[in-house]
Every structure is written in C-alpha cells, then in structure tokens.
Image (cartoon, grey):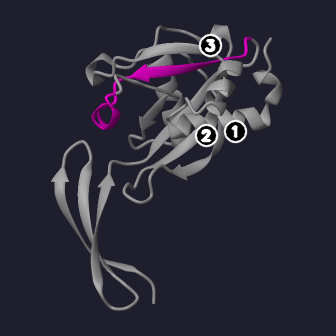
Amino acid sequence: MTNTITGIRTIHDGWSQLLVATIRRPDGGTINREIEDHGTAVGLLPYDPERRVATLVRQFRAPAAHATGASDVLEAPTGLIEGEDPTDCALRELEEETGIRLRHVERLGTVWSMPGISTERIHLFLAPYGEADRIGPGGGLADEHEEIVLEEIALADLAAMADEGRLDDMKTLCLVQTLRLRRPELFRPA
C-alpha cells in the first residue's frame, strides 16, 4: 500500500489556494499536509549569443522580502500559464517583461519548484535573441504592478555569480547552468 490522498479542503482561496490534504499512510494512519496551489508557470533565459549577455529581470518578491528582507530578486523572466500552451506563454511573458519578441524558444523540460509544499511546475526554456528582437522597453504590465527592472548581464559574469553562490533564484541558476553546459563558449570573456 502507498500513501493516498483521501480528502482535500480549501482553507484560503485568493491569488493562490492553500489546501489541506488528508493522507492515508501505508500503516493505516492519517496525516495532514498543506499544499500551496497557484498553477503552472514558465521560466526562460533570454540570451544574446553574439554579445554574450543575458537579459534578466529584477523585481520585488514579497516572500523573499519577508524571509530575508531582500528588496528585490534577480531572476529569469517568469509567468503563470493562463490557459495557454507553455511555449506561447513563454513568448508572451518574454515580450511583456523584457520587450523581446521571438517566434521560437528552446524547451528544456518541466520541473517541480518546491514539491514538498507547492503544486507549481515550471516549464523551462532558453531564448536566444539578437538586438533586432528587442521591440519595446519591457518592464511588465502596468496593471499587474510588477515594476520590473531589466538587467543585461554578461554570461561570464552570470557564470561567476553561479560559482560564487550569488544566483539565489533556483530556476535562474538551473537555466544559466544548462546554457553553460550546452554552450560553454558563450561564457568565456569576449
């Protein structure tokens, strides 16, 4: 016998839901576990292979501010899937957050962000672009109050940040390291 969810109750329903699952254990006993549920997301690393830079976003994140006092988080563009194909969502989020318009991105896979507490799965993409692909200022949508600041960072500097433990957003670290494995020549100083 395995663990089985026998019931779910919602204790908060807002931007995300907080659920409590009742789980029947193999020994017949039951336990409760909290589940944070806000949907599936995309995360992508836009990088310019010619100039050897990546465009990241910096924005306020309430959980990070609460946990560490951080005023913002440097991260790869990210967004929730809103009833659309993950690739379409990635292309939309890329344009909204960075002002970069692409037709194609390279899909890496789908990962759990925090399987011990959250239902969130993130579809990860690499997004090579050129200067001609930047069609606007980015910064996110005004009605979403994202207040996104763009940062273009040399890929060699991102590699150093990863090596020094200074990339503290997990999806960004994963994306940078994947690009580093696939295209190591882009991380050498120009």
Q: Secondary structure at mark 3?
A: helix
**1 and 2 marks in contact (CB < 8 Å):** yes
Q: Secondary structure at mark 2?
A: helix
Q: Which residue is mark 3?
A: 133
- The label on residue 178 is 1
**Residue visible at 56% across and 34% down?**
172
Q: CA distance from mark 1 to mark 3?
A: 23 Å
Q: Earlier in the sequence, mark 1 or mark 3?
A: 3
Q: Position of residue 128 (x, y in %)?
A: 68, 24
Q: Would residue 65 be counted in the magenta stretch?
A: yes
Side of 171 where 25 appears, left or right: left
Q: Which region of the structure is painted magenta?
A: 51-69
Camera-nearest label, 1 or 3: 1
Q: Which residue is mark 2?
A: 174
Q: Position of residue 189 (x, y in %)?
A: 78, 15
Side of 11 where 167 appears, left or right: right
| Local crowd size for mark 2, using a 10 Å CA cut-off: few (<14), some (14–19), many (≥20) | some
Instruction: Check the image and name the residue furthest to the front.
Output: 164
